[in-house]
Image (tube, rainbow, N blue to C red):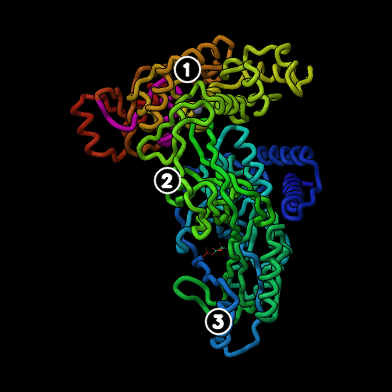
């Protein structure tokens, strides 16, 4: 076998395994063996770059970053759908199209309306080339790198099919995966995602495709758009799409009358809760493609299709009380406690009330009868009060004035919808939440210690903050409930091991407000140590790329707090990484230390980002605007005239790209 054949055969094999696993839900290889083969392929591809293929399974693991998603004009407009809400609506539609087509003989396909984000996949010569969101229907965003990480999509469909086409479908987040994501968020002390649809559509626009790859997204296909006249009917084209590897749900049905459409609607109105994903209706399409063409489009939607929307299920029940939950950041969420009631296949006992405004808007009072609805949200919501059932003399609800956990007076800042408990260091759920965040996977990633144990350790008085973790001894932990010697040892070992976690993750773990994963990375890279960061003033902070006022202020608040200073000192004394390691620094120099650079214009040898990185790696700082503090301006072609004048006025050195390169070499 030639190298090229070897590569092709590996690609084919891995594609097949992906298909079996992600489309057929029937694994044909262990994860371990899959990884070995993938590595093997990767190695061959690196050694033989002439056989590169953007659609190779090695190109689907994610990691590429997209800063700005390119706007792309759709070759064929992506229409929306007209809606119908009753059988009469559907009969009216049938009459209209029968009249236009001059026949009563119309076949329909019935499909579920998958609830996610629409996507348009373009294939040329049978190969995937790009994925674009619906956008406004005329233009969307190019999200190719993100979509490629969804492994149920075949990039090189295998078998007899049209060759130049668009596949339209819906990116969804199956319920199982969505719930798992939320469990993880809760364990990390983060707020839950509201519903699968928004989370799916938000995922498409994440900058880091590696992050997208981690999400259990799926893609269900519902339309083949092509000028090749290979198929006569919509159903046939979908069936063939399924045969060559696309995930076309098995729930689609071909029916011969509108009565049969009603049967389909009735069937799924009750069975939809058993599906692994959410659906909010049925889409009915004229099956014959010739007839579709004759019917054409209105300004907004095809005439040959219509959506039938299921009614959101509602029940009424009694509001027994309102409790207030405190999150890791101190944010308060009011929760309605309801008389348990059956809704959409589950027992509902609680519903979110969001905030004080919501309670006021609904004028909801304890002992009211309320309507509860389960829409896209995982937690059901209260739609309205049934005022006809309000008992006399119900007291208006007075929003909590004090924290339910620590009794501190709640505060609410202008422009904030939520109330906060300000007692950061004395309020149990905030303490626990911060430690849970500290140990979470993306932060200190402490093995052998879970969210519940953290709460237990706090209740037992063994920890009050994350630094206390490093003082824990096996003997202290063993006596705890459900704790065996082995697990106690694992826990302490896990804590010990976290001392190796790099600074950027430690910085994220500290839980400084607004300092998420990416911001932490930026800051770590720029300031290189916690001491530098905590000593930085507002100016210095906002001069860092992408650090705005809000983040800067939050870091200053954190750094000025005596409690935090002590915590950080203790972490340092335990040996936690509070500066960038020597290894990372090795590739960096301090040649430019103390100098602030502004980069302006177009460059030839380095890209703008490479230039900025080179400045930072050599100890310099990059600022976006010229001020008295600027030391150098690296000027490329077409530098703005106003910048030039300003620089000259201030007497700042203006250097060329080449000057800069000489400077660091
Ligand atoms: P709407 O956004 O309410 O106008 O509905 C149109 C959208 O429904 C399309 O853009 C698709 O993203 C989505 N959709 C979900 N399932 C289907 C389906 N089976 N056929 C067509 N469109 C669907
Ligand atoms: Zn509190």
Q: Secondary structure at mark 2?
A: helix
Q: Nearer the viewer, mark 2 or mark 3?
A: 2
Q: Nearer the viewer, residue 342 or 227?
A: 342
Left or right: where does residue 113 sit relative to residue 3?
left
Marks counted in the figure total 3
Q: Residue furthest top?
A: 573
Q: CA distance from mark 1 to mark 2?
A: 33 Å
The magenta segment: 606-627
Residue found at x 71% / y 16%: 477
Q: CA distance from mark 3 to mark 1?
A: 67 Å
Q: Which residue is mark 3?
A: 92
Callout 3: few (<14), some (14-19), or many (20+) C-alpha neighbours within 10 Å? few
Residue 179 drawn at (x, y percent): 65, 45
Residue found at x 79% / y 39%: 33
Q: Nearer the viewer, mark 1 or mark 2?
A: 2
Whether 422 is drawn above or below 176: the answer is above
Residue 197 drawn at (x, y percent): 57, 53
Q: Which residue is mark 1?
A: 564
Q: Quadrant of residue 614?
A: top left
Mark closest to the chain's N terminus, 2 or 3: 3
Callout 1: few (<14), some (14-19), or many (20+) C-alpha neighbours within 10 Å? some
Q: Quadrant of residue 373?
A: bottom right
Q: Secondary structure at mark 3?
A: helix
Left or right: where does residue 533 sit relative to residue 441?
left
Whether 109 is drawn above or below 455: the answer is below
Is residue 536 magenta-colored? no
Q: Which residue is mark 2?
A: 357
Callout 2: few (<14), some (14-19), or many (20+) C-alpha neighbours within 10 Å? few
- Kindly tell me whether residue 527 is visible in this rendering: yes
């Amino acid at each position: 076998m030639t190298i090229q054949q070897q590569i092709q055969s590996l690609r084919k094999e891995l594609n097949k395994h992906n298909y079996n696993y992600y489309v057929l839900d029937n694994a044909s290889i262990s994860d371990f063996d899959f990884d070995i083969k993938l590595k093997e392929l990767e190695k061959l591809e690196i050694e033989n770059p002439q056989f590169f293929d953007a659609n190779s399974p090695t190109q689907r693991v994610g990691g590429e970053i997209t800063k700005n998603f390119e706007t792309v004009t759709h070759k064929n407009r992506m229409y929306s759908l007209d809606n119908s809400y009753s059988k009469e609506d559907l009969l009216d539609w049938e009459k209209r199209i029968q009249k236009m087509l001059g026949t009563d003989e119309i076949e329909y396909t019935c499909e579920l309306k998958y609830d996610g984000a629409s996507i348009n996949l373009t294939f040329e010569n049978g190969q995937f080339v790009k994925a674009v969101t619906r956008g406004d229907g005329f233009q969307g965003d190019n999200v190719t790198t993100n979509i490629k990480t969804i492994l149920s999509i075949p990039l090189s469909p295998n078998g007899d099919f049209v060759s130049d086409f668009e596949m339209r479908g819906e990116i969804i987040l199956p319920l199982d995966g969505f719930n798992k994501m939320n469990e993880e968020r809760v364990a990390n002390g983060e707020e839950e995602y509201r519903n699968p649809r928004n989370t799916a559509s938000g995922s498409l626009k994440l900058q880091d495709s590696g992050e997208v790859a981690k999400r259990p997204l799926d893609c269900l296909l519902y339309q083949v758009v092509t000028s090749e006249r290979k198929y006569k009917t919509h159903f046939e084209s979908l069936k063939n799409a399924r045969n060559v590897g696309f995930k076309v749900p098995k729930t689609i049905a071909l029916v011969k009358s509108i009565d049969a459409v009603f049967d389909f609607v009735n069937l799924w109105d009750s069975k939809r809760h058993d599906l692994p994903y959410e659906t909010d209706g049925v889409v009915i399409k004229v099956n014959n493609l010739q007839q579709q063409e004759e019917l054409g489009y209105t300004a907004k939607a095809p005439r040959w299709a219509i959506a039938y929307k299921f009614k959101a299920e509602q029940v009424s029940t009694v509001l027994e009380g309102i409790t207030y939950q405190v999150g890791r950041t101190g944010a308060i969420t009011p929760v309605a406690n309801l008389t348990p009631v059956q809704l959409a296949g589950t027992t509902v006992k609680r519903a979110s009330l969001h905030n004080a405004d919501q309670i006021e808007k609904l004028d909801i009072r304890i002992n009211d009868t309320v309507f509860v609805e389960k829409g896209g949200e995982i937690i059901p919501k209260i739609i309205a009060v049934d005022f006809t059932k309000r008992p006399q003399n119900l007291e208006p609800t007075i929003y909590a004035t004090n924290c339910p956990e620590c009794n501190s007076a709640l505060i609410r800042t202008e422009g904030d919808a939520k109330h906060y408990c300000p007692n950061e260091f004395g309020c149990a759920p905030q303490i626990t939440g911060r430690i849970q965040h500290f140990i979470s996977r993306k932060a200190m990633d402490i093995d052998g210690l879970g969210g519940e144990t953290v709460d237990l350790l706090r209740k037992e008085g063994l920890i009050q903050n994350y630094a206390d973790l490093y003082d824990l001894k096996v003997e202290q932990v063993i006596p705890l409930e459900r704790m065996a010697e082995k697990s106690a040892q694992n826990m302490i070992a896990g804590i010990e091991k976290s001392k190796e976690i790099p600074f950027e993750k430690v910085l994220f773990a500290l839980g400084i407000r607004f300092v998420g994963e990416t911001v932490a990375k930026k800051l770590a890279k720029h300031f290189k140590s916690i001491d530098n960061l905590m000593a930085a003033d507002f100016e210095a902070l906002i001069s860092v790329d992408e650090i705005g006022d809000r983040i800067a202020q939050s870091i200053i608040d954190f750094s000025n707090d005596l409690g935090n200073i002590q915590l950080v000192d203790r972490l340092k004394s335990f040996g936690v990484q509070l500066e960038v390691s020597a290894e990372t620094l090795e590739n960096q120099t301090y040649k430019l230390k103390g100098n602030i650079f502004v980069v302006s214009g177009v460059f030839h040898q380095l890209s703008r980002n490479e230039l900025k990185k080179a400045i930072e790696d050599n100890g310099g700082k990059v600022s976006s605007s010229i001020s008295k503090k600027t030391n150098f301006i690296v000027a490329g072609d077409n530098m703005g005239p106003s910048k030039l004048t300003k620089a000259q006025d201030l007497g700042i050195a203006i250097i060329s790209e080449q000057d800069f390169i000489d400077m660091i070499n």
